Amino acid sequence: MANIGHWELDIENEELYWSDEIKKLHEVDSDYTPDLERAIEFYKEGEYRKKVRSAVNLAIEAGEPFTFESKIITHKGNERWVRAIGEPKMKEGKCIRLFGSTQDITELKKTEKKARKAQQKLRDIIEHSTVMFYRHDTDHHLQYLSPQSEYFLGCTPEEGKQKWTSFVTDHPKNKEGLKKTEKAIKTGHPQPPYELQLKRTDGRTIWVKVNESPITDEGKTVAMVGCMTDITELKEKESQLRNIANNIDGMVHRYQRFPDGHDEFIYVSEGVRELHEVTPKEVLADSGVLWSQIDDGYIEEVRKSVDISARNLSKWNQKWKIETPSGREKWIHGRGTPQKKEDGSIIWDTILLDITEQEQAKNKQQELYRIIEESLNEVYIFETDSLEFVYFNSLAKDHTGYTEDQMQEMTPLDLIEDAEICQNFDKYLRPLDLANKEVVTFSTIHKRSDGSVYPIDVRLRKEGYNGKPVYVAVILDITNQKELEDHIKRQVSLLNHILDSLPGLFYMVGEDLTFSRTNKNVEKLFGLSAEELQATNALSLVAPREQKRAKRLIGKAFQQGYAELETILIGKDGKEYHYYMNGSQIKLADKNYVIGSGIDVTKRIRTEEENRVLLQEIHHRVKNNLAIISGLLSLELQELSQDSYGQMPLERSINRIHSIAKVHELLYQSASFSYVNVKRYISELTDTAMMTLQKGDNIHIHLELDDIDMNINEVIPLGMLMNELLTNSLKYAFSEEGKGVIEVNVCKSGDRYEVHYQDDGRGFDRRDFDNSETLGLTIVKMLLKQLEAKFDVDTEDGFELKFSFKEKKTGSHSNM
């Protein structure tokens, strides 16, 4: 849609999306990233910005949709008028999303201003003209009289609203005029001007010249409009033309064509200066001055219309386009009445009006109808009394399956499946009738001609159409949206079930250390509800003597991506409980969180002689918990189609969990709780990645691994790093059926570990690695940083990463 863009504001995640058209409207770069405050600041300071801010706040706080017109100042400092429409999306009484559109209406505002000016000029003409304007119905009852009725009829406009024939005398000439009026009503075509003798209310008679035209609706005359000119004391034609010219927005001229074909203007009003940008003297000297301005595409049509008027002595009525000496294009509407002289020449007394604004408005209206027809929404217009459809676009017919003839005999109630809405449909219309609301929105179900149904959102307005009030309904098919919402609900339900089924604690805290998410075990331990926990600082649940160390380790998780500790928590009974906690840093909606789990190790701490058994149990439980999560995610993965957008994130998540779980499994099986054998760990990690990603025999992995033990604080990030590299290579480096080789070398030189990873895949742009916005490569760089590794990367003709990091001599809990 021209000059219209759409936008969407995610309230929960504080993200604002602008379409390219809106960015173009605000004159910002295509990569510009807006937020709500900066978007509001584009509106002109003062009442304009206050109105916008109030509408947005009301939509977020009360769920009220909005439509407003306001001014903006673009990035380049240009002032523009825009019309914005916003619709809130509510969930559990809370606004979670705003979406809508913004349209550039600058030119429309300019046109409206010009139209008001033209209308005022026309009103001034009517109010101050020496001509009486009127309108009467097909039964001759006067519906409108201009103030000149006091002169022409001897009464006020209100007193004159009766049959106009009651003012007509019995003069024989009046019968001819009445016949022309009846013919115009019957045929719908204007008739030549005629003369009438009228009798005023004071008994005085006057002669008038009548010019009138029928108003038709679908080929039937519904009224007559016209004007009467007092010709009681007939003046010279030229004097009459000058008087008319002084009271119209255009020009008047007298044009003469002779039998030999040559022509001339014998009178031209001063209006030619404004209309054609030439002087009356120039036109009188050379008729070609005006003819030469007519657009080439219209010149023959105008000449032909003059020929027909001259041949038939019929009223001349024509529209055409001109180009003035300054280069301006204008639309002209000319009307004139021919008279044949004794010498055979024809003289037209003609009025020319500038109708450029009307033609432009008509073209815009036609473009609007085209846009509605090509709209991606169903559009219906129906009557206010019978509710019968008077218009519906093509998409409405296509979606419902009804023919045009069928639709013309239907109402909205025939399409709505919900019986309750049908019975109470008036409650949606009443606010529009009372002007309490500009837009009424609701959701319901539409039914098609074949009996099938689909969910819709409805936006209902009251507008004017063909001179009468109507209701306009814009329908949005929300089938896909509903399916997506249901899918998200299932995913959330599954995640909640997974978290609540974990035997230990699960938590997610923000940088302010308040809980964003917990499982039931956390609520049970502290005796607090989920809502109460969200307002609780995590450190307040830690024993005071442990709070400083806990705060330092949480900060480390935020800074380095991972941390673990044993600490003491204060339960709801006031007792102390020893917990083994771990946490990893994640980023959601530009906010940082630490997500982790906790295992109750109170008995291990209190029973030192069972220390080894309990440590094994911890690793076993963590491994099993991660295996449960991995298994559930695998089940979810099986439900997704091969081309589902959600498959890859699940596969990546499974492999990341495996990389951590494998460490705990090896520690559980090991006599040491601080070191893991690298050769065994990476070998098993590689097998798991190949199995999860279901790669065939075409991909070969060559491992050259020293038989070395590595501290748990180094082997976990190394394992996660290898998992990300293997996942990226197996998923993206090779073609669907192509062969490939991956090489992994790990050795120890002095006090440093050296790692070499390489594949012979397609490679990629080095800039994608340096400026990566993908989660996988972001994790790779984060883990390299955590290991304090020195690295070198080559992405041409495959992918190669070499890095080394220093061995740390500390144990498994050295980060506490």
Image: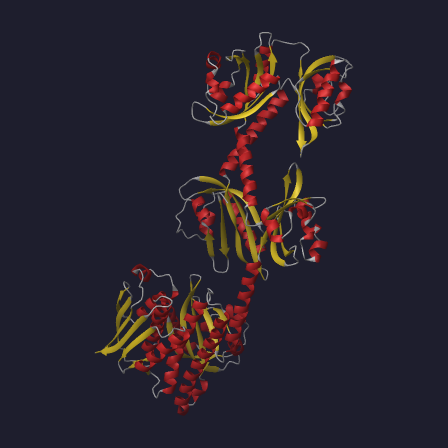
Identify the image quadrant of the C terminus.
bottom left
Left or right relative to 269: residue 414: right
Write the residue at 28% across / 73% down.
743
Q: Residue furthest top?
A: 343
Left or right relative to 658: residue 165: right
Residue 594 sits in which quadrant? bottom left
Say which of 727 and 741 sits in front: 741
Q: Residue furthest left?
A: 750
Vertical arrangement, residue 47 with respect to residue 293, above or below: below
Left or right relative to 694: residue 811: left
Q: Position of residue 682 (x, y in %)?
A: 33, 78
Say which of 2 and 89 sits in front: 2
Q: Position of residue 768 (x, y in %)?
A: 33, 60
Write the residue at 66% across / 18% down.
193
Say which of 387 and 297 sits in front: 297
The answer to whether residue 144 is seen in the rendering is no
The answer to whether residue 3 is seen in the rendering is yes
